Structures are given as structure tokens and as C-alpha cells.
């Protein structure tokens, strides 16, 4: 029973959170950068929303500024030919087709910066870097691996940037992150006996972010950004529909979200054309296990995620003083292979096609709109049922078709 409660419950705190980038990371934190598929996000510093990727870029922004907006994320993930089931429940069942298992959501953001003097700039941001809702029918073939998942996060990041020389700027900040999850799945309670489990938990933990920006010339700059691991300890409770008070209890889980390192370049070809590029590495291999403890639970589950790399290129064209057009393309590799991929997040390699428009409303106000279509490779879940904790859940095999439409709108205002 100990291992039985481990992965389907708290394990989904991570793996179900989103389907846009590898693992559970949401890149959508800037409408302007969205238009270039986040190419050059660590070097562009075109408005203060780019500080999410590199806080050092804040030194390019004088006076008092604010940037706020939101991203509408409409993912699609459909399962076909799902075959699975617990040996304790009589073997496999088949679900030929599962409708859309993911739901649209809005990810808001807010930034505020204040130039302190010629050297120092302070800022604060509020972001939702993780979060999604996934839902299967309670009777589908893979119900022992997951049915419903609802994950929300909120991150407050105070930042400080310092202009060390005419060419070099440095930046740092603290990630103050809150995460909350509500999850459910079917649970084997004995031979031929099935129950339904619901779990909720939350936590608040702190990490950090670092960045550097080197301005080689007025036209060319390079940036590097680093976001640290955040070590979480979730506290919550687990409830059983049928057994109720006999099994309900408080639980805790320790997990580590990955660090990321990105490099970007930005270059103005002339007064109209600009080009940019980005390469990023997310160290998902740090997520190798998940441990859960309760009054009667002490379980360890292996995960076997792998580090991922993303590449992006982009270009912008300034039509006149009011209008700018953006475009970008990116490749984002998946974090989990077929053997360890779960129904919570049937992700795969992704290809980003982005475009955007910037409009200067007046000398102090700028509007940005960005759109991205993400085409994902067909995902497969091939869990054999022999991983830690899978003995009662059994194997599951399913094929998935995934894609995402993303629309971002942001407003910048200079006081």
C-alpha cells in the first residue's frame, strides 16, 4: 500500500503542469519576446518583461516603467488506442479514443522597474511559470496513472541590476514561488477492489536568478541568464472516496525543480532590421526521484528525466516609429522518453512558429501582441508496469497527438 499512493498522487504535482515546453516549464512571460519565439530573450532587453530571462537587461531602461499582460494558452492533447489496467483488477482494458485531455488557461504577468541612479536599477515581477489542468474520464484505461490534475503557481521575483562598465551589466533576483496542486486517480485497494483518490497540497519556497549583459556595440549585445533549482517540500492531505477516514492522512513530498541556463544574441542590422538567437539548457536530470511520506507512507519513485536543449532564431522589422513586426522559430526537445513518459504529460519534441506586432500608442505607451503555434511530435506512453510503484497500477500504452495555440498581449508604460 505504501508504494501504491506514491506516484499517482503527488507525482503529478510536477508532470501534469503544462504542455508548451519541455517538462513543466512555461516560457510565456513576455508578449514581445513571444513574437520572436523567445529568440534573443536574454540579450534583447527590449522592454522590462525580458528581465524574466535576464535581470541584467534592466540597466537599459531609464526612469520608472511597468509592463503587464497575459498569455492565452490553448493546448490540445488527444489519446488514441489506450490499453492498460492493473493486474489486480483483472488485466487490461482498452479505450479507443480519449477527447482533449488538456484545458485552455491564461498566464498573467506583471513587471515594475525603477532606476535608482546611473548604476543601479531595481525591479519586481509577478509571474505564473507553471500551471495547467488535465482531465481524463474516471473509467479510462489509464485511470490508475491519473485522471484529473489542477496545478497553479505564482512567483514573486525582486531583482537588482548593476551597470558595472559602459558595456557590462549584471543582475540578480530571488524567486519566491508558491505552488498548489489538486490531483486525482483510481487506486487499487486489493484484488478486485478499486477506490478513487484525491490529493491536494501546497508549498512556498525560494530560489534565485542571475544574469549578465554585454553590449559589444550600440547594435550588438549578448546575454546569459540562469534560473536556479527550487527545492520544494509540499504539505497536504490525501482522501479516499470509499475508505474515507480509514485511509485519509496528511502527507509531504520533496522534489526539486530544475535549473536552466540560456545564452542569447541580438543585433541591429540597420534602422529597420534586427536579428536574434537563443540557446537554452534545462537540467531536468536533477528530477530523478520523488519521495512521499505520511503516517503510513514512506515511498520512493524513480523518474529518469533527462536534460533538454532548445534553439531559437528570430527577426524583427521596424516599419516606422509606431509599428514593429516580429517573427521567430524554435525547437524544443522533450524531457522524457517513451519508457518513462506518463499520461499526466504526454509531451514530445516541439516546433515553435511565432509572429508578433508592436504598436506605439504614444510616447509613453506600447502595445505588444504575440502568437505562437506549436507543433509537437506524436507522443507515446509505453509504461511496462515494472517501475517503482507501478506494480498495482499496471502497464499503459497510448498514442497522443499534441499541439498548442498561444496568444499573448502586453502593455508597456513609461511614467
Image (cartoon, helix red, strand yellow):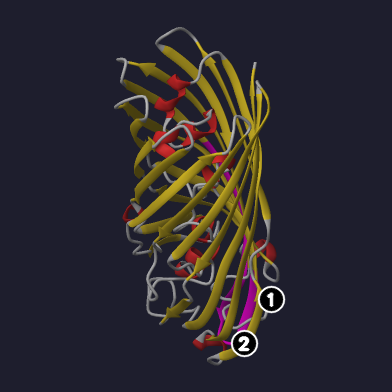
Q: What residue is drawn where x is 59% and y is 83%?
A: 141
Within 10 Å of disc 1 (Cα), the crowding (few <14, some 14-19, many 20+) is some
Above or below residue 328? Residue 127 is above
Helix, strand or loop: magenta stretch = strand
Q: Is residue 248 visible?
A: no
Horizontal and vertical percent for residue 339? 38, 76
| Residue labelled with disc 2 | 95
Secondary structure state at the residue bearing disc 2:
strand
Q: Which residues are magenta?
A: 177-196
Badge 1 marks a residue whose secondary structure is loop
Q: Is residue 224 visible?
A: yes
Depth check: give the residue in front, 356 or 278. Answer: 356
Looking at the rendered structure, which numbered label has been put on residue 346? Answer: none
Residue that mark 1 sits on: 137
Cβ atoms at labels 1 and 2 below 8 Å apart: yes
What residue is drawn where x is 42% and y is 34%? 270
Q: Is residue 373 above or below residue 160?
A: below
Q: Residue at x 36, y 24 (%)?
A: 218
Residue 310 spot, x, y in % from top left: 37, 54
Residue 19 lies left or right of residue 256; in this view the side is right
Amino acid at each position: 500500500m505504501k508504494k501504491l499512493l506514491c506516484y499517482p498522487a503527488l507525482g503529478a504535482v510536477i508532470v501534469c503542469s503544462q504542455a508548451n515546453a519541455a517538462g513543466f516549464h512555461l516560457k510565456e512571460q513576455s508578449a514581445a519576446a513571444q513574437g520572436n519565439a523567445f529568440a534573443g530573450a536574454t540579450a534583447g532587453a527590449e522592454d522590462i518583461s525580458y528581465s524574466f530571462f535576464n535581470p541584467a537587461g534592466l540597466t537599459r531602461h531609464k526612469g520608472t516603467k511597468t509592463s503587464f499582460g497575459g498569455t492565452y494558452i490553448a493546448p490540445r492533447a488527444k489519446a488514441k488506442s489506450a490499453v492498460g489496467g492493473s493486474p489486480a483488477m483483472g488485466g487490461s482494458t482498452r479505450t479507443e479514443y480519449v477527447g482533449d485531455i488538456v484545458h485552455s488557461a491564461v498566464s498573467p504577468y506583471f513587471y515594475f522597474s525603477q532606476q535608482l541612479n546611473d548604476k543601479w536599477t531595481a525591479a519586481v515581477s509577478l509571474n505564473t511559470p507553471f500551471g495547467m489542468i488535465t482531465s481524463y474520464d474516471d473509467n479510462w484505461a489509464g485511470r490508475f496513472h491519473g485522471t484529473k490534475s489542477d496545478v497553479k503557481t505564482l512567483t514573486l521575483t525582486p531583482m537588482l541590476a548593476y551597470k558595472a562598465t559602459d558595456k557590462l551589466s549584471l543582475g540578480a533576483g530571488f524567486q519566491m514561488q508558491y505552488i498548489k496542486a489538486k490531483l486525482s486517480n483510481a487506486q487499487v485497494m486489493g484484488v478486485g477492489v478499486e477506490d478513487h483518490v484525491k490529493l491536494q497540497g501546497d508549498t512556498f519556497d525560494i530560489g534565485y536568478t542571475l544574469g549578465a549583459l554585454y553590449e559589444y556595440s550600440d547594435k550588438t549585445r549578448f546575454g546569459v541568464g540562469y534560473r536556479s533549482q527550487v527545492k520544494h517540500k509540499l504539505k497536504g492531505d490525501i482522501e479516499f472516496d470509499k475508505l474515507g477516514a480509514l485511509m485519509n492522512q496528511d502527507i509531504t513530498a520533496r522534489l526539486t525543480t530544475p535549473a536552466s541556463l540560456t545564452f542569447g544574441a541580438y543585433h541591429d542590422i540597420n534602422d529597420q532590421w534586427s536579428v536574434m538567437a537563443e540557446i537554452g539548457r534545462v537540467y531536468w536530470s536533477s528530477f530523478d526521484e520523488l519521495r512521499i511520506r505520511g503516517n503510513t507512507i514512506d515511498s520512493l519513485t524513480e523518474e529518469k528525466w533527462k536534460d533538454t536543449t532548445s534553439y531559437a532564431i528570430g527577426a524583427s522589422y521596424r516599419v516606422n516609429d509606431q509599428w514593429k513586426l516580429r517573427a521567430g522559430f524554435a525547437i524544443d526537445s522533450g524531457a522524457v522518453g517513451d519508457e518513462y513518459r506518463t499520461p499526466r504529460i504526454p509531451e514530445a519534441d516541439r516546433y515553435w512558429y511565432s509572429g508578433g506586432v508592436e504598436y506605439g500608442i504614444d510616447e509613453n505607451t506600447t502595445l505588444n501582441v504575440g502568437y505562437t503555434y506549436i507543433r509537437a511530435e506524436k507522443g507515446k506512453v509505453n509504461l511496462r508496469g515494472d517501475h517503482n510503484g507501478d506494480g498495482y497500477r499496471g502497464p499503459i500504452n497510448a498514442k497522443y497527438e499534441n499541439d498548442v495555440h498561444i496568444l499573448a498581449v502586453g502593455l508597456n508604460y513609461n511614467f
